[in-house]
């Protein structure tokens, strides 16, 4: 097959082009190291390190006990503030929670008068406001019970609710974030590299030159797909091993080989998408702007950041056409739940189908756009 | 005033290297003032480098260059004299802005030199009239023919009355008529302004005859200096072309001989190329109008005509790159397009502009093409070496084409075109910019191919001596063929002395006039803006850049639409789509008890809007499997005897298994399960005992501030606004500088008396405007569609947005001045902005919980500060008194970005 030779040779050329741009290489390395590490290590969606302040209007032994009850890692050491500092502190985002212990709180508790306590929550902090409020509530009740009954503070419910999290027993969000960040960065990189490579060849006239040689449009596209895909899959797998597994110490349940295979399938799909996009933009500035909505939507609305089932149903259906939606399902199943190919093959199949559609669109428009440029 | 100098420029021991290759090697030279000085020599001997150094657009490495009485190594002198120098770079219209009209291009240069509106109008009118461009003043520069582009470039150079005009191969790639007109124009301008010095490089020896003073160069050194007559007598030859060859060192002359075209026996009846009524229309413009010709196998067929007359379009139709609107063409007897691959293997094509990979080395380019044409492995290396040798490319085999002069690049393209030994060559101006010796060598090869191997050659050219070597030529003008036949026959038909004269006669007969008017620009001789001026920045020049950039944006409605509609679509998708409200969590139940009590709890679960029930689970293996496939995110396990234990007060356990892979969802879901359970227990207690159980001694009353409904739909859009106002504006400017570098118009910055910051600010301002328009549309969307109130200070939001978009666009400029390629610019902007904006700004996760590097990166990026303003105004109802520190930080950011971009931007070439 001569076609395969062309695809191979053009792909090697593609890799040379990448290596000749040190700034671009530096950015790829940054993308799969620093950009993964800082996000996984710095961001936490579970309650962690939350800032809380307490207005102590009671100044009792109980209120003092409450102040000392909020402990790391869930909370930062509480600041005791005055009532007048509440609004400024919350306005500037310094405190996410402010607990207001009313005067006579201890007396009410001891008298069994059903004491109330107000908790101000910054509800713009969507990720922790709700969970944090329930944590605060249980901490307060445990402390009060300890204070009143001198017991361990356990609330005696008639039913014991045992909550367990499979795959991630401590509900450590860095597990989730690290892998999702790799996928997000991989998406951005693949779309831009493949799409921009086509535009560059068109702007420099090299595409035209290829098309008068015995090389077909699909060979040119396949070459871009395999070459850019290979670089990115390698970078992603290395990042998964070195940064996520080794440096961050996140256990990986499933098979890295299966993940690499799935990534290769996914990259076929999104590089084809990048090339299809490039046929809708005539110049690089246009492509830059066109790519933003695509990768932003793929990064934020494919189930990697916010769960799909919470989105409006129309949007849920719409994102099914994105390969990332299916790949994220695949990646979560493989990496967290150790799923095998027998479970995840449907996701891979859909990803291939979507990729093939994009490839066909790109192929149809490939020559037409060339004529339009001149 | 200094005394008048008799030299306009002086070089002392100047050496200039590009990596290992020395372009200039210890050159010392004095260039006389007030003369027409020509630099001649083969490609890659350092002509362009020398011109660049004299004009001050190239950084001096070693030696001294003095222009207009001062050192060009001294920045102050450069700034002072650059307004007295005009520099026209190599390449057709390279310093022009293709979407701007003829008038707008000249007007832009006038503005750079701070000319008043009246002065500009008068000068432009004069220049347009004298160059014959006045009928085309509204035509975009990109749509001009090559000759017209060069005239326009000249107008742009002359707008400020330079004392020194530096022209780098101004007529390369221009047809004979336009070339003649161009030099006549220069002569007339010099007649008006006798004091002006002109320094020019040329590849045409016939042009060099008209210069007053010649500098012949070879391999970075000066060969000879003197008048054309002096050079000729020194070499003892009659014309300059042979004189130059005679002046070359012995080894360079070897192998050079006068070309002879052996006669050819015609093979009647068979044709390699047949075109019949070939027509190409672009919209209502007819580029090629019913062109017909037949070319026999082994024939050398020349295509002559002015730039833009349809030669290239005809060739593209023959290669199948364009599909003809009308007419037929056959290659080797087969209609084009039917047997694409087979035909392509038999044809070699070379396009007019360089179309090989500039990032691959010369050798790699050849090897790649050898591979793509499937040369047998055994022959591949030998063939590449053979071509390197034959095209004299061995010395530069490892260099990238980008670093090579035009002529050498053309040689490489030729080598690639003949690599697979095609039966037919279609060559579009293959020798444009190639020096005489290399051109002769190339023609020797063509003749050999044609006569020995019977290769059919279809070639377009501007060189008349090349046209004379063709078997037949075709004269084209405005899409039509004027005449066709053997060169000698055409000359005789018009009774002309040379083919060039015959060609011009044909053109004139076809109604083409010499469009140079006899009138000469009557320019005011007072120099209005002699230097860069004092003061910090000139608003006038900033405005010149801003105005030009704005016009370019408006001429690209697609980009403008992406920039304005993209954010609106994204706001809708993100505003509704990003949600931390956990709803419809899919769960299934393994109820091993099936009692009244267990069912009551499960009913409570299924009636909650937070959960969505799936078919029940039958055993624990199934639980594992269904969670593994991701079908359920929660499994409730109720043990046997649950109901009995509950009633007996034996505290039974309920198991809630979450899929922990999405930890946020699991955390939130846990709270909801607890909530359902407590409510259920309360109900149960009411029913059994009639009283509410007091499990908890204290009621914690949460007060959800800023977002009472506690819905993502209110909390997320202010963050999305922030994200969009940094990503899109930064992307808009990120390509600004690097694109001008790739396209060549950055040279205007090097040559003009402009400060770097003026250039950057001028490029930035229009995009701040676009970004603020986008801001307005997004705020309207938030207020109407999302129904978010605006309780805080709008003024604080507006000022914040202005500062933020200024910082964002300035950041784009930093990226643009730093990176080397447009791809890197797009990627850098996307990835550098995306990570801290989404993760570390407070848009998704509260800033106060960030740790370590994440917190630092967040604080070192502007996103966080506008997030505070946006959320502060939309959610928290705040005013300047609380928010002002954020405004100050944002202002500090754009100042910092400005400084960085200014420092990174070079004002000279390497």
Image: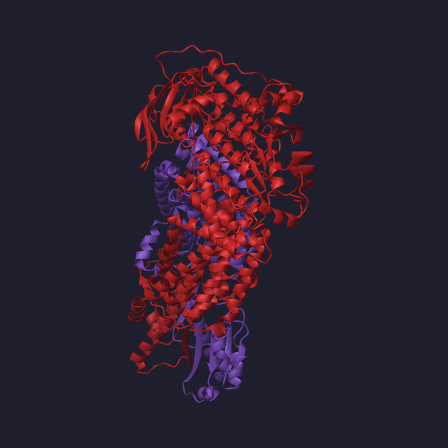
* Front position in the image: A173 or B64: B64
Which one is in front, A102 or B834? B834
Percent from the top left, x then y, of residue B413? 51, 28
Name the tint of chain A in the rendering: purple
Task: Pick the quarter of the image with the C terminus of chain B.
Answer: top right
Q: Is residue B867 visible?
A: yes
**Location of residue B370 in the rendering, given as x and y in whole percent from the top left corner:** 50, 26
Residue A226 appears in the picture as rendered: no
Q: Which chain is red?
A: B
- Estimate the x, y position of residue A167 in percent, counting from the top left: 45, 57
Residue at point 59%, 48% (across, down) = B906
Return the x and y of residue B330 as percentages of the image width and height: 34, 22
Nearer the observer, B107 or B690: B107
Left or right of B803 on screen, residue B289: left
In the image, residue A331 sits, relative to residue B270, either above or below, namely below
How many numbered tags mark residues here?
A: 0
Q: Is B503 rendered above or below residue A316?
A: above
């Amino acid at each position: 097959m001569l076609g395969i030779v062309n695809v191979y040779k053009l792909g090697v050329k593609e890799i040379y082009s990448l290596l000749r741009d040190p700034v671009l290489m530096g950015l790829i390395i940054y993308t799969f190291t620093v950009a993964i590490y800082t996000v996984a290590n710095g961001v936490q969606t579970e309650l962690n390190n939350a800032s809380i302040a307490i207005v102590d209007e009671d100044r009792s032994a109980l209120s003092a006990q409450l102040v000392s009850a909020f402990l790391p890692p869930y909370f930062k050491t509480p600041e005791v503030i005055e009532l007048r500092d509440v609004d400024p502190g919350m306005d500037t985002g310094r405190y996410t929670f402010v607990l207001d212990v009313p005067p006579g709180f201890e007396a009410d508790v001891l008298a069994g008068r059903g004491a109330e306590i107000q908790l101000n929550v910054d509800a713009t902090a969507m990720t922790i406001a709700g969970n944090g409020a329930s944590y605060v509530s249980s901490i307060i009740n445990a402390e009060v019970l300890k204070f009143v009954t001198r017991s361990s503070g356990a609330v005696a419910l008639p039913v014991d609710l045992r909550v367990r999290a499979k795959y991630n027993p401590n509900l450590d969000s860095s597990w989730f974030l690290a892998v999702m960040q790799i996928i997000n960065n991989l998406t951005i990189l693949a779309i831009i590299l493949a799409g921009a490579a086509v535009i560059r060849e068109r702007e420099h006239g090299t595409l035209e030159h290829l098309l008068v040689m015995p090389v077909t449009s699909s060979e040119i596209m396949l070459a871009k797909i395999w070459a850019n895909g290979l670089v990115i899959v390698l970078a992603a797998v290395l990042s998964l091993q070195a940064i996520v597994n080794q440096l961050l110490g996140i256990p990986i349940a499933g098979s890295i080989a299966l993940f690499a295979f799935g990534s290769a399938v996914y990259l076929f799909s999104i590089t084809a998408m990048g090339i299809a996009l490039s046929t809708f933009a005539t110049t690089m500035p246009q492509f830059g702007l066109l790519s933003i909505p695509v990768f932003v939507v793929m990064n934020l609305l494919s189930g990697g950041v916010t769960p799909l089932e919470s989105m409006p149903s129309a949007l849920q259906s719409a994102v099914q056409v994105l390969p990332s939606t299916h790949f994220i399902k695949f990646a979560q199943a493989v990496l967290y739940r150790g799923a095998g190919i027998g479970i995840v093959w449907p996701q891979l199949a859909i990803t291939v189908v979507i990729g093939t559609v994009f490839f066909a669109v790109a192929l149809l428009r490939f020559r037409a756009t060339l004529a339009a440029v001149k | 005033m200094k005394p008048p100098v008799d030299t306009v420029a002086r070089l002392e021991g100047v050496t200039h290297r590009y990596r290992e290759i020395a372009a200039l090697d210890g050159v010392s030279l004095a260039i006389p003032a007030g003369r027409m000085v020509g630099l001649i020599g083969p490609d890659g001997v350092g002509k362009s480098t020398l011109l660049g150094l004299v004009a001050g657009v190239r950084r001096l490495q070693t030696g001294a260059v003095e222009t207009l009485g001062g050192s060009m190594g001294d920045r102050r002198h450069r700034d002072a004299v650059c307004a007295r120098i005009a520099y026209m770079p190599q390449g057709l219209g390279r310093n022009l802005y293709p979407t701007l009209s003829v008038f707008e291009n000249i007007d832009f240069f006038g503005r750079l030199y701070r000319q008043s509106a009246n002065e500009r109008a008068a000068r432009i009118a004069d220049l347009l009239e004298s160059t014959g461009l006045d009928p085309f003043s509204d035509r975009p520069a990109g749509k001009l023919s090559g000759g017209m582009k060069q005239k326009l470039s000249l107008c742009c150079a002359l707008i400020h009355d330079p004392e020194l005009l530096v022209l780098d191969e101004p007529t390369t790639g221009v047809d004979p008529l336009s070339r003649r007109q161009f030099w006549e124009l220069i002569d007339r301008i010099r007649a008006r302004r006798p004091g002006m010095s002109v320094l020019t490089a040329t590849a045409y020896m016939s042009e060099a005859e008209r210069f007053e003073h010649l500098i012949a160069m070879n391999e970075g050194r000066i060969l000879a200096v003197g008048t054309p007559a002096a050079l000729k007598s020194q070499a003892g030859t009659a014309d300059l072309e042979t004189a130059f060859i005679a002046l070359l060192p012995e080894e360079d002359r070897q192998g050079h001989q006068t070309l002879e075209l052996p006669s050819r026996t015609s093979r009647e009846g068979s044709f390699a190329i047949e075109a019949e009524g070939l027509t190409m229309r672009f919209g209502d413009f007819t580029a090629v109008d019913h062109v017909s010709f037949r070319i026999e196998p082994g024939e050398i067929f020349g295509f002559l005509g002015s730039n833009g007359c349809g030669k290239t379009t005809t060739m593209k139709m023959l290669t199948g790159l364009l599909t003809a609107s009308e007419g037929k063409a056959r290659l080797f007897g087969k209609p084009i397009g039917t047997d694409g691959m087979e035909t392509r293997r038999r044809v070699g094509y070379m396009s007019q502009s360089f179309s090989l990979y500039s990032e691959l080395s010369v050798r790699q380019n050849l090897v790649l093409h050898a591979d793509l044409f499937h040369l047998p492995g055994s022959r591949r290396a030998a063939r590449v070496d053979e071509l390197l040798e034959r095209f004299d490319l061995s010395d530069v085999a490892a260099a990238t084409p980008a670093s090579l002069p035009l002529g050498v690049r053309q040689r490489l393209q030729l080598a690639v075109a003949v690599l697979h030994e095609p039966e037919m060559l279609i060559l579009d101006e293959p020798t444009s910019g190639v020096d005489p010796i290399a051109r002769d060598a190339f023609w020797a090869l063509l003749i050999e191919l044609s006569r020995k191997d019977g290769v059919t050659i279809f070639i377009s050219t501007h060189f008349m001596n090349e046209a004379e070597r063709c078997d037949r030529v075709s004269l084209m003008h405005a899409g039509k063929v004027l005449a066709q036949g053997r060169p000698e026959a055409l000359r005789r038909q018009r009774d002309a002395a040379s083919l060039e004269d015959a060609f011009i006669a044909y053109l004139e007969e076809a109604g083409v006039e010499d469009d140079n008017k006899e009138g000469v620009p009557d320019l005011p001789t007072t120099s209005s803006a002699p230097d860069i001026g004092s003061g910090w920045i000139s608003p006038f020049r900033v405005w010149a850049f801003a105005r030009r950039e704005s016009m370019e944006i408006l001429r690209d409605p697609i980009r403008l639409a992406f920039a304005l509609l993209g954010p609106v679509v994204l706001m809708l998708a993100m505003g509704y789509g990003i949600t931390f409200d956990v709803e419809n969590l899919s769960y299934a139940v393994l109820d091993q008890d099936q009692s009244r009590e267990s069912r009551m709890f499960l009913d409570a679960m299924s009636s909650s809007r937070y959960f969505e029930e799936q078919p029940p689970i039958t055993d624990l293996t199934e639980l594992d499997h269904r969670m593994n496939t991701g079908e359920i995110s929660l499994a409730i396990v109720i043990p046997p005897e649950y109901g009995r234990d509950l009633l007996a007060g034996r505290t039974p356990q309920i198991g809630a298994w979450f899929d922990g892979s999405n930890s946020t969802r699991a955390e939130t879901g846990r709270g909801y399960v607890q909530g359902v359970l407590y409510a259920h227990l309360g109900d149960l207690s009411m029913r059994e005992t009639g009283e509410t159980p007091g499990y908890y001694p204290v009621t914690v009353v949460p007060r959800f501030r800023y977002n009472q409904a506690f819905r993502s739909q209110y909390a997320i859009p202010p963050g999305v606004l922030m994200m969009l106002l940094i990503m899109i504006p930064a992307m808009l400017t990120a390509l600004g500088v690097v694109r001008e570098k790739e396209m060549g118009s950055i040279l205007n910055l090097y040559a003009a008396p402009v400060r770097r910051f003026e250039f950057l600010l001028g490029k930035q301002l229009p995009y701040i405007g676009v970004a603020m328009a986008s801001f307005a549309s997004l705020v309207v969307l938030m207020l109407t569609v999302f129904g978010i109130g605006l309780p805080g200070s709008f003024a604080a939001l507006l000022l914040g947005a202005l500062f933020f978009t200024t910082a964002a666009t300035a950041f784009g400029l930093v990226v643009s001045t730093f990176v080397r390629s447009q791809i890197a610019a797009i990627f850098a902007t996307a990835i550098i902005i995306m990570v801290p904006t989404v993760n570390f700004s407070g848009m998704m996760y509260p800033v106060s919980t960030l740790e370590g590097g994440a917190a630092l990166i967040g604080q070192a990026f502007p996103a966080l500060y506008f997030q505070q303003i946006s959320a502060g105004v939309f959610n928290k109802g705040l005013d300047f008194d609380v928010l002002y520190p954020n405004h100050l930080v944002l202002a500090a950011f754009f100042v910092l970005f400005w400084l960085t971009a200014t420092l990174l931007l070079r004002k000279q070439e390497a």
